[in-house]
């Protein structure tokens, strides 16, 4: 019998419906837990990734379209996220800077199994991984969070980190005054019991235990700030650096810090690690998590998580949402790939027409 | 106003409906014409391609999943075809060996504009490009076509070449007897006025003016035959070679032939050109077409088109089918990417819920 070629489409609306049903805190907790498991159990022999590649350009708008593939051997699956980064989207089109979709393929047949919205899941999984890195490398008593860049990513950074630390104060800054102004109303629904303080980068650096930087700083325009006095301990999640020549943190800070990349192979191409020699870079997040016991001394020091974003995270997020979609019976089933009624005859459908 | 994020989905059924409406000969003629224009006008500054890349494996089934991207600057578009090649598909699952889908992205925003069945279009565009190469390099009086490999691709090879040459005899061979047996009934609906002759490779080589090889020969198992006596003129479209270590033609034949790759950068990695030194390889098809006047002497000689398949062909095919889909008002519109009602707040939908 011919194998079924249904493709399950999970739209942004379905993702929202899942979150409404499960609850936003619960979804974030699940993403943190599943991402943690995926990284601490990471096996490079089972999860094959190629560093992402893509097209980048200045016309018609500054942007890029790139693809992030992973093959999970034990799942008999390939996942590809295609992601667009277009920093003019909010102003020009009222669209998020980052648009993406995720597709999964069966390695038995090559069949496109599912196509899933990547916009909200990407934002969530990027928050989740910062929570994991902050828990691993940040001070145990952290209660002050700094946010440099108050766009879409800052909301999920705050949310995720609030799930693993009892935050008391949140300092926030954006070079765009309207983003600063709207920030409190945008995070209201997180129901956090903490003080929101609009401020400047200097104060964020001096007051924070943990900082997430998530800006659209231009290529060659980094760093976001000159190195300044901080607490003795400070953990920074550097989120915005995701392109050759784009980075957020000053070299001096990186040099004084333990820098943990999500994936060295990619971080040296487009992360903060571009600025560093290999000997100045710590272990990958997966290895740091495997050897977490040995890293406790870092909690009193300066640390950086260089978060470029990898397909392993998208695989985790896709699986979390696919599981809930199945339970809630959500999604459109569409047969996209033409199976042909005769696998050796692309024109078989015409023959059948003639006969009928 | 927020830009619309509709994704147009064109399924295999829509592709079939278009073909039924337009007619199979007319669709093939359009693909030949549009592919010809795309190659003869090819501008490497405007059509950026990266050689395809992917995962290949022997488990759970022999196969590969690979991605073929192209950025057409003047169209403000990126197209990515994701293609699976799983030679056990017909026997194990009654599915075509090649499954694929094509997605297109707007380079203004990164938006996924369309997702299109790639199965039938790939088969058609692969036929179309053989017709173009055969017309360019094959003998003007060609009337005898040989087909080595009688799977799905052989049907569109025969169809396409029959559109540009008045074929009188078609010699066909496959190592799989059932494919040989079913071949005549599979091509019946092409209504060709020519004799179909089931035979062996030796006779195909000695009798044909043009040959298309489209086999699933294994990696390292080529060539399909030892070099034998042919006519003084013979043009071969080598279709099956599309993987490192996979090739169909004997080196001796290649060495005596003018070898035109569809795209040198890819053909030297996975085409017949793997077997050749750079100085033994002719110009890319696009350059051959641009300088066709100077190649007339080749029509009396041995020539090879090394057809690995490139994203430029998929762009042509996508545009042909999208044009017809628009005219016939076919396709599903789905909003896959979550646009968020506030582009700076992934959770804005929750807020709205709360307010309502």
Image: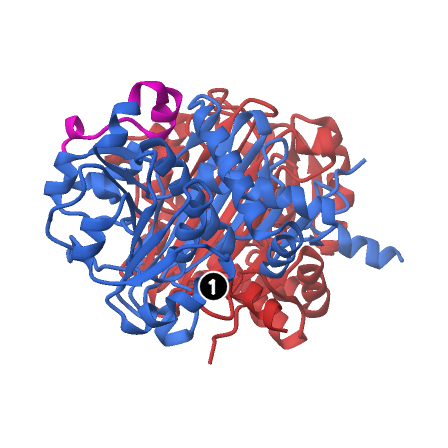
Chain colours: A blue, B red
Magenta extent:
A276-295
Chain on which label 1 sits: A
Placement of the N terminus of chain A among the 4 image quadrants: top right
Quadrant in which the C terminus of chain A appears? bottom right
Asked whether A294 falls inside the magenta stretch, the response is yes
Q: Which residue is the extreme one toward the bottom?
A: B1
Relative to B117, say whether B354 is above or below: below
Q: Is residue B233 above or below residue A18?
A: above
Task: Count the numbered circles shown.
Answer: 1
Based on the picture, tell me whether residue A285 belongs to the magenta stretch: yes
Q: Nearer the viewer, residue B186 or B109?
A: B109
Is the stretch drawn in magenta largely helix, strand or loop?
Answer: helix
Seen in the image, is B182 located left or right of residue A266?
right
Return the x and y of residue B35 as percentages of the image width and height.
Answer: 47, 60
A192 sits left or right of B149 in the view: left
Q: Position of residue A340 (x, y in %)?
A: 73, 47
Foreground: A156 or A74? Answer: A156
Q: Position of residue B285 (x, y in %)?
A: 37, 51
Residue wearing tag 1? A188
């Amino acid at each position: 019998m011919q194998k079924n070629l249904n493709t399950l489409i999970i739209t942004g609306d379905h993702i929202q419906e899942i979150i409404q049903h499960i609850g936003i805190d619960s979804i974030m907790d699940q993403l943190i837990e599943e991402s943690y498991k995926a990284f601490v159990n990471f096996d490079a022999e089972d999860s094959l990734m190629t560093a992402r590649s893509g097209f980048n350009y200045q016309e018609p708008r500054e942007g890029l379209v790139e693809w992030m593939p992973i093959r999970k051997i034990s799942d008999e699956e390939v996942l590809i996220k295609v992601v667009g980064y277009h920093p003019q989207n909010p102003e020009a089109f009222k669209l998020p800077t980052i648009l993406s979709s995720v597709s999964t393929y069966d390695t038995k047949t090559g069949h496109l199994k599912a196509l899933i919205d990547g916009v909200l899941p990407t934002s969530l999984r990027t928050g989740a991984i910062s929570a994991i890195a902050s828990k691993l490398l940040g001070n145990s008593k952290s209660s002050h969070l700094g946010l440099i860049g108050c766009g879409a990513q800052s909301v999920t950074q705050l949310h995720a980190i609030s799930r693993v630390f009892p935050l008391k104060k949140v300092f926030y800054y954006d070079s765009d005054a309207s983003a600063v102004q709207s920030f409190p109303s945008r995070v209201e629904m997180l129901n956090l019991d903490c003080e929101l303080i609009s401020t400047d980068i200097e104060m964020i650096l001096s007051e924070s235990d943990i900082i997430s930087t998530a800006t659209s700083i231009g290529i060659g325009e980094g760093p976001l700030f000159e190195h300044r006095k901080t607490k003795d301990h400070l953990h920074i999640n550097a989120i915005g650096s995701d392109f050759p020549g784009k980075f957020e943190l000053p070299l001096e800070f990186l040099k004084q810090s333990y820098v943990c990349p999500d994936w060295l192979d990619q971080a040296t191409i487009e992360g903060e690690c571009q600025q560093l020699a290999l000997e100045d870079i710590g272990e990958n997040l997966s290895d740091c998590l495997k050897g977490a016991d040995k890293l406790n001394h870092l909690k009193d020091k300066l640390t950086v998580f260089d978060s470029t974003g990898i397909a392993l995270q998208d695989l985790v997020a896709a699986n979390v949402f696919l599981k809930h979609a199945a339970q809630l019976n959500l999604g459109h089933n569409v047969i996209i790939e033409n199976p042909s009624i005769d696998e050796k005859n692309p024109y078989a459908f015409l023959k059948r027409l003639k006969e009928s």
